[in-house]
């Protein structure tokens, strides 16, 4: 469950209601909207670490549950539905609670959604926790294609926090794309403090100092 300080409400999307858990920062100078992984929820350790770090930097956080999770399903919806639902939620938040410099992100599948939609929602930066660069090869099957083009299509600053033993691979750094390696695997459970510090330091650089 999200921390008790959050306020939750449902927002309509083209694919059913999504649920937003809003953590308001004191004298907020920015907003960060985060999505969950394909089979997990918003209580993932790395999402909670990022939330703590953002609040410490006076950045309000909205944790978004996709409609399929709100409906009680674990199997993710197709990418186009995830993207459409995400865009609808972010646009509604921007028109109401989050009239602040906006960053988006998420863990794993949620990070992919944030990358694919960053331009459309007008994000000033993207936070990727455990970006799934390439699905692990199945025995006897051909290698799956890389998701690197999703990262390369983003034109705003990106932070990727990746476990050194992540079975989905390690993205490379590039101009505007920072990669921080931390102890652990794809779950990013092993060093929550390192995840939080990487996020905090990045937010301190990319969010305007005063609003």
Image: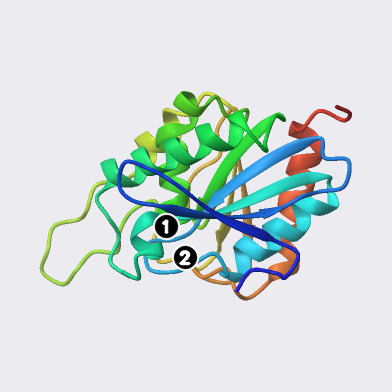
Mark 2, Cα crowd under 10 Å, few <14 / some 14-19 / many 20+, is many
**Vertically, is 165 above or below 30?**
below
- Asked if residue 137 lies left or right of residue 153, the reply is left
Q: Residue at x 43, y 31 (%)?
A: 152
Q: Residue at x 27, y 55 (%)?
A: 77
* Residue topped by disc 2: 166
Q: Residue at x 40, y 35 (%)?
A: 116
Which sits in the foreground, 30 or 9? 9
Helix, strand or loop status at disc 2: loop
- Where is residue 128 shown, x and y percent of the image? 54, 48
Which sits in the foreground, 23 or 126? 23
- Where is residue 86 shown, x and y percent of the image? 43, 42
- Asked if residue 104 lies left or right of residue 204, the reply is left
* Residue topped by disc 1: 169
- Asked if residue 207 lies left or right of residue 166, the reply is right
Count of all numbered marks drawn on residues in the image: 2
Quarter occupied by the C terminus: top right
Q: Residue at x 50, y 28 (%)?
A: 121
Q: Quick check: marks 2 and 1 in contact, CB under 8 Å?
A: yes
**Quadrant of the rendered image containing residue 168:** bottom left
- Where is residue 137 shown, x and y percent of the image? 23, 64
Q: Is residue 122 visible?
A: yes
**Vertically, is 148 above or below 56?**
above
Helix, strand or loop status at disc 1: loop
Q: Is residue 126 visible?
A: no
């Amino acid at each position: 469950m999200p921390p008790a300080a959050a306020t939750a409400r449902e927002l309509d999307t083209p694919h059913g209601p999504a649920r937003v858990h809003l953590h308001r920062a004191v004298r907020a100078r920015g907003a960060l909207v985060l999505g969950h992984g394909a089979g997990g929820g918003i209580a993932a350790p790395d999402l909670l670490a990022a939330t703590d770090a953002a609040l410490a930097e006076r950045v309000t956080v909205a944790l978004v549950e996709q409609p399929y999770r709100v409906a009680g399903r674990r199997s993710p919806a197709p990418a186009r539905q995830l993207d459409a639902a995400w865009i609808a939620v972010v646009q509604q938040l921007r028109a109401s609670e989050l009239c602040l410099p906006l960053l988006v992100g998420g863990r794993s599948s949620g990070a992919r959604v944030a990358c694919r939609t960053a331009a459309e929602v007008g994000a000033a930066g993207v936070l990727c926790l455990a970006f799934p660069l390439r699905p692990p090869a199945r025995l006897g099957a051909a290698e799956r294609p890389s998701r690197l083009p999703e990262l390369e299509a983003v034109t705003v600053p990106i932070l990727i926090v990746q476990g050194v033993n992540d079975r989905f691979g390690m993205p490379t750094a590039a101009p505007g794309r920072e990669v921080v390696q931390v102890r652990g695997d794809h779950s990013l459970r092993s060093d929550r403090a390192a995840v939080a510090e990487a996020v905090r330091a990045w937010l301190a650089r990319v969010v305007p100092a005063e609003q």
